[in-house]
């Protein structure tokens, strides 16, 4: 784990995800994976969560979703291309002593569009490039980006083959989702009705990443494409860019949409599975959406070889 400096004294914890071959997608027998046909154009008869193998370069990913304090520290830098919102947050009032005194500003940033994420990352990367030597960095400065969906799912799974990196089910004491409903043999429990401070559960997967199931949906770099094994799909794990021929033929607005992964505090547990492929317009803003960035490992940097 490395701590990447941010403006204003904030830091970003990054965890290394090993490279190599990774298995992603879900078997056709996995519970509640057949909802796409009734929810998305171009999905009837398509294996939207097809099992597949990708080969990834090692990369580093933020341990938690970006917090409100981290967002504000970078958003206050001079803009590159467009304005982005600083506040108010949908969930900004602290709840209890933990949020008020132990972790102020540590609620994950919600209501952020894909477009706003891109501007935030450009500001951060410009600041890092200009300050890298002053920060003690050597070699090439890392450049952060939204993960591809292949990177995201590989990081989430941490070599697991089950619906969740925890196993075959979720429990409300492990993750933040609509806990009044169950998945598989999971326990029925609490509906918190809001995000919680990052690190709330004290649990990580095998790679050391936290809160990948529930909490907030997370933007990925890919454009939405119903068939993840179709023509032009990158086997090297990079973000899919372009228009899916199936969507082009339908003339649907979904050809502009971007991928979202992981489910949220609002969603039923089946939306929080590792393989779920949600999507929406890049200008979409919602209280259930946030993000966490990643970067490749440049030789010689503080992030290692």
Image (cartoon, rainbow, N blue to C red):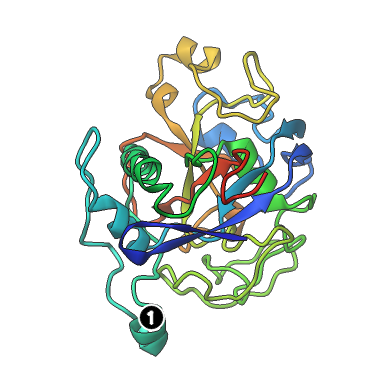
258 or 271, which is in the foreground? 258
Question: Can see residue 67?
Answer: yes
Can you say whether 223 is above or below 100 in the image? above
241 or 231, which is in the foreground? 241
Residue at the image position 35 percent from the left and 86 percent from the top: 101
Question: Can see residue 32?
Answer: no
Describe residue 248's horizontal placement relative to residue 114 as left or right. Answer: right
Mark 1 residue crowding within 10 angstroms, few (<14) / some (14–19) / many (20+): some
In which quadrant is the N terminus drawn? bottom right
Can you give x and y, in whole percent of width and height, for residue 127 in the image? Answer: 34, 45
Can you say whether 171 is above or below 79 in the image? below
Residue at the image position 38 percent from the left and 42 percent from the top: 121
Q: Does dot 1 land on a helix, a strand or a loop?
A: helix
Residue at the image position 50 percent from the left and 49 percent from the top: 137
Residue 114 found in image quarter:
top left
Can you give x and y, in whole percent of width and height, for residue 83 in the image? Answer: 19, 41
Residue at the image position 60 percent from the left and 48 percent from the top: 60
Can you give x and y, in whole percent of width and height, for residue 199 in the image? Answer: 53, 72
Q: Report the number of discs.
A: 1
138 or 228, which is in the foreground? 138
Can you say whether 62 is above or below 147 in the image? below
In which quadrant is the C terminus drawn? top right
Residue holding disc 1: 99
Can you give x and y, in whole percent of width and height, for residue 51 in the image? Answer: 76, 34
Residue 185 found in image quarter:
bottom right
């Amino acid at each position: 784990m490395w701590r990447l400096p941010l403006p204003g004294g904030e830091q970003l914890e990054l965890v290394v995800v090993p490279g190599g071959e990774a298995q992603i997608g879900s078997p056709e027998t996995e519970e509640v994976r057949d909802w796409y046909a009734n929810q998305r154009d171009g999905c009837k008869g398509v294996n939207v969560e097809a099992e597949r193998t990708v080969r990834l370069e090692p990369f580093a990913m933020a341990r938690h979703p970006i917090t409100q304090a981290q967002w504000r520290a970078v958003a206050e830098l001079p803009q590159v291309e467009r304005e982005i919102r600083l506040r108010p947050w949908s969930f900004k009032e602290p709840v209890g002593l933990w949020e008020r005194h132990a972790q102020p500003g540590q609620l994950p940033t919600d209501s952020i569009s894909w477009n706003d994420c891109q501007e935030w990352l450009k500001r951060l990367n410009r600041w890092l490039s200009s300050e890298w030597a002053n920060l003690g960095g050597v070699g090439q400065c890392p450049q952060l980006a939204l993960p591809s969906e292949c990177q995201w799912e590989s990081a989430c799974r941490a070599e697991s083959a089950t619906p969740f990196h925890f196993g075959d089910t979720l429990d409300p004491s492990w993750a933040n989702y609509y806990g009044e409903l169950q998945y598989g043999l999971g326990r029925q429990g609490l509906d918190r009705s809001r995000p919680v401070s990052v690190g709330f559960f004290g649990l990580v997967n095998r790679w050391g990443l936290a809160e990948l199931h529930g909490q907030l949906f997370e933007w990925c770099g890919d454009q939405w494409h119903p068939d993840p094994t179709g023509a032009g799909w990158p086997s090297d794990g990079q973000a899919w860019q372009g228009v899916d021929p199936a969507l082009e033929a339908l003339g649907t607005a979904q050809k502009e949409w971007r991928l979202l992964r992981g489910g949220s505090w609002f969603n039923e547990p089946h939306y929080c599975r590792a393989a779920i492929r949600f999507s929406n317009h890049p200008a979409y803003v919602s209280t259930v959406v946030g993000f966490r960035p990643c970067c490749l490992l440049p030789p010689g940097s503080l992030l290692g070889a």
